[in-house]
Image (cartoon, helix red, strand yellow):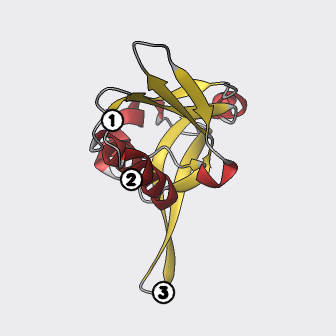
Amino acid sequence: EVTVFARTLDGVNDLLKEDAMLGMLVSARRRNGEMGFIAEDAYPLKDVAERSQQCVTIVLDAERVEPTALGQLREVMRDHPGPTPVLLELESPDGDVLVRAASEYCVAMTTAFRAALVALAGVVRVALTSGGTP
């Protein structure tokens, strides 16, 4: 049994048809001693292979990023562990730098993760992208 909240349901409503086979990104949480599952995203089953090759790209503005931002970013990634690798892109007038985060910083691309990133100063955009090799 998986709980689907309205914010997730709104984004996948067109996929929900009787007997439809779906892939899901699900977070597991223990509450009051019982394990519960919450749907974070759903997609057609045919897209599973493509989605497994995706990564999260976090773009930072070098001129607006706070000195403490990388430490905060590290904490946000640790707070949202998952299967998706992360690329960090630092945009600067002198040229961009692209770095792949270590595998210990793979994340779950959830609404809560996006919200935590957007709250950090200097984050320009967050996207789920194909590939993942800088």
Asked if 27 appears above or below 115 in the picture, the reply is below
In the visual, does 35 lie left or right of 116? right
| Residue 98's disc number | none
| Residue carrying label 1 | 65
Q: Residues within 10 Å of mark 3 (few under 14, many from 20)?
A: few
Q: Which residue is identified by label 3?
A: 33
Query: Where 44 falls versus 108 (above or below)?
Result: above
C-alpha distance separating marks 3 and 2:
30 Å
Residue 77 image offset from top left, x and y in percent: 49, 52
Measure the alpha-carbon separation of dots 3 and 1: 40 Å
Amino acid residing under circle 2? Gln
Residue designated by label 2: 72
* 90 sits left or right of 117 in the view: right
Which of the two labelled residues, at mark 3 and mark 2, occupies the earlier sequence position?
3
Disc 3, SS: loop
Tell me if 32 is positioned left or right of 118 in this view.
Answer: right
Position above or below: 108 against 11: below
Extreme residue toward the bottom, this view: 33
> Is residue 1 something one can see in this rendering?
no
Amino acid type shown at disc 3: Gly
List x then y, in percent, for residue 84. 61, 43
Give the residue drawn at x 53%, y 49%: 108
Foreground label between 3 and 2: 2
Front in this rendered view, residue 40 or 98: 98
Residue 99 visible in this rendered orientation of the protein: yes
The residue shown at (70%, 26%) is 133
